[in-house]
């Protein structure tokens, strides 16, 4: 069976991260499995985990009164899920629901913050990688907002 | 960019603007505002040779003429297919036509997708919205000549699940082992369980070899701009990227200058351009 260290080493988010840091992260990690339909987190709940998806698909959603659930983004194998554990008030802003059997590594947010505070080199590595993902997410959101395909559906 | 070898060339003799009547054999409603017309020529012998990526001028009698790409199978089928989104005067009038009605057609015009240059390479097709229609002939061609190509990958983005074109065919192609299809929507509600996010998100994890690959991109210009950036990040050279441009057209044959883009005419030098040769013009605001 693969151990946490080898799974983390292979995850694209941690590509080329020094082995000693991977070993530090193992101390904050656990294997998690979500069945189809399971909520991984819900809007407003404490954001205490950072997920590295190994397999499956997760939809990030929000609920709008009178409009129902709107799916905003999906996350799949090789991607990360959630960064609200990083920024106060450490609460999720959206729901995340597994739409397939999903396996992930969950890193404890508090533990990870402490490790990053203790070792700023590790902190910088994690922030650099997260900044890239946040920037990509921002760009993608802008494109979504531009509604580039035009007002084609009835609504 | 490639042009039809056996171009039958309606309206290309002494009277280049002359259209030929085609009757509508079948109308297929693709989405809320998009439809496909299957057209047949009255001429005996039939057939309509074209290269994937080329377009025709379609004349709705008494209303006007619009350029529409050919979305059907280029491998010798008798029926000519156009997939159109109803956005304005002519396309809305076209939407109202019935089976048995007649349209005036001239073409095919313009440059095609580089299906010959892509031989022995992976093909990556990135389509956004109605942009899948001009690329569908590439898929037909690649699947009919499957052993000539490496991987065939389709990355398709639509606004919502209800806006996805050619559902049945996508499902059929997806079940093949020799083609990869990834679909994403900008937003979804209901029972959707697929990808949500912009089509550019699909590029980084798509299984093609950027060194031996030809990318063909069609969709709104802003989507093509961001797609090119992602393809470049994956290491595809600008010369291996092809895009299809749209400009308002009148003559469709390089006479009136209506479709001018920089020093080129989209109707004649395009609509398919090599990005490496076209990048100085592409995305410039004043163009
Ligand atoms: C080479 C080429 C190939 C094309 N292939 C296709 C195709 O396969 N399928 C297809 O549906 N269209 C295609 N188009 C676009 C199509 O030609 C136009 O949508 C059409 O000319 C619009 O004419 P209209 O009279 O219906 O609209 P107009 O009355 O001229 O326009 C009405 C309104 O619609 C807007 N509009 C015009 N064109 C578009 C557009 N493309 N998208 C969104 N809004 C628009 C205008 O800004 C205007 O506000 C192609 C264009 C070119 C140049
Ligand atoms: S439409 Fe007349 S030159 Fe292109």
Image (cartoon, rainbow, N blue to C red):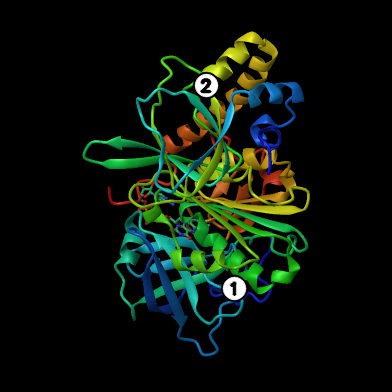
Residue B223 position, x and y percent, is 53, 43
On residue B161, the disc is: none
Q: Residue sitting at 73 percent across and 53 percent down?
A: B213
Q: Residue sitting at 68 percent across and 41 percent down?
A: A2
Which of B183/B99 is in front? B183
A29 with respect to A154 (left or right): right
Residue B190 position, x and y percent, is 33, 50
Q: CA distance from mark 1 to mark 2?
A: 55 Å
The residue carrying pointer 2 sits among few (fewer than 14), some (14 to 19) or many (20 or more) residues within 10 Å by Cα, namely: many
Picture quadrant of residue B124: bottom right
The residue carrying pointer 1 sits among few (fewer than 14), some (14 to 19) or many (20 or more) residues within 10 Å by Cα, namely: many
Residue B132 position, x and y percent, is 51, 58
Q: Is residue A106 above or below residue B107?
A: above
Q: Residue sitting at 38 percent across and 38 percent down?
A: A61
Q: Residue furthest bottom?
A: B44
Same subunit, labels 1 and 2: the answer reads: no
On residue B74, the disc is: 1
| Helix, strand or loop under label 1 | loop
Q: Which of pointers 1 and 2 indicates the residue nearer the eye?
A: 2
Residue A93 position, x and y percent, is 39, 27
Q: Residue furthest front?
A: A1
Tell me, yes or no, whether the two marked residues, 1 and 2, touch with CB atoms within 8 Å.
no
A124 with respect to A106 (left or right): right
Which of B231/B108 is in front? B231
Q: Is residue B70 above or below residue B249?
A: below
| Helix, strand or loop under label 2 | helix
Q: Is residue B41 above or below residue A74?
A: below
Evaluate whether residue B133 shows in this view.
yes
The chain that hosts pointer 2 is A
Residue hosting label 2: A109
Evaluate whether residue A18 shows in this view.
no
């Amino acid at each position: 069976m693969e151990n946490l260290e080898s799974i983390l080493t292979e995850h694209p988010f941690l590509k080329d991260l020094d082995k000693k840091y991977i070993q530090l992260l193992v101390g904050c990690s656990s294997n998690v499995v979500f069945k189809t339909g399971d909520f991984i987190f819900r809007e407003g709940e404490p954001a205490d985990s950072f997920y590295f998806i190994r397999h499956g698909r997760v939809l990030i959603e929000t609920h709008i009164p009178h409009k129902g659930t709107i799916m905003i983004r999906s996350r799949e194998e090789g991607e990360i899920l959630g960064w609200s554990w990083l920024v106060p008030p450490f609460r999720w802003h959206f729901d995340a629901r597994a739409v397939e059997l999903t396996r992930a590594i969950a890193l404890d947010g508090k533990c990870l913050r402490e490790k990053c505070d203790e070792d700023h080199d590790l902190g910088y590595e994690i922030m650099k990688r997260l900044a890239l993902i946040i920037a990509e997410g921002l760009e993608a959101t802008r494109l979504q907002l531009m509604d580039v395909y035009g007002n084609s559906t009835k609504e | 960019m490639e042009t039809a070898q056996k171009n039958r060339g309606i309206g290309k003799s002494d009277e280049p603007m002359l259209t030929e009547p085609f009757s509508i054999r079948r109308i297929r409603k693709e989405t809320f505002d998009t439809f496909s017309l299957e057209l047949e020529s009255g001429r005996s012998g039939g057939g309509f040779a074209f290269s994937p990526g080329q377009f025709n001028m379609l004349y709705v009698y008494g209303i006007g003429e619009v350029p529409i790409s050919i979305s059907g199978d280029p491998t010798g089928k008798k029926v000519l297919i156009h997939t159109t989104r109803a956005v304005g005067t002519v396309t809305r009038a076209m939407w109202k036509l019935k089976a048995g009605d007649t349209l005036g057609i001239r073409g095919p015009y313009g440059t095609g997708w580089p299906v010959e240059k892509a031989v022995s390479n992976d093909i990556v097709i990135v389509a956004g919205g109605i942009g899948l229609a001009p690329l569908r002939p590439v898929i037909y061609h690649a699947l009919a000549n499957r052993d000539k190509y490496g991987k065939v990958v389709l990355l398709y983005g639509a606004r919502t699940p209800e806006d996805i074109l050619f559902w049945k065919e996508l499902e059929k192609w997806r079940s093949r082992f020799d083609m990869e299809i990834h679909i994403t929507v900008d937003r979804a509600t209901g029972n959707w369980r697929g990808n949500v996010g912009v089509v550019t998100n699909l590029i980084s994890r798509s299984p093609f070899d950027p060194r031996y690959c030809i990318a063909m991109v069609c969709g709104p210009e802003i989507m093509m701009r961001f797609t090119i950036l992602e393809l470049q990040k994956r290491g595809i050279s600008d010369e291996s990227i092809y895009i299809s441009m749209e400009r308002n057209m009148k003559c469709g044959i390089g006479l009136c200058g209506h479709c001018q883009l920089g020093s080129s005419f989209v109707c004649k030098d395009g609509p398919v351009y090599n990005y490496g040769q076209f990048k100085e013009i592409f995305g410039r605001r004043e163009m």
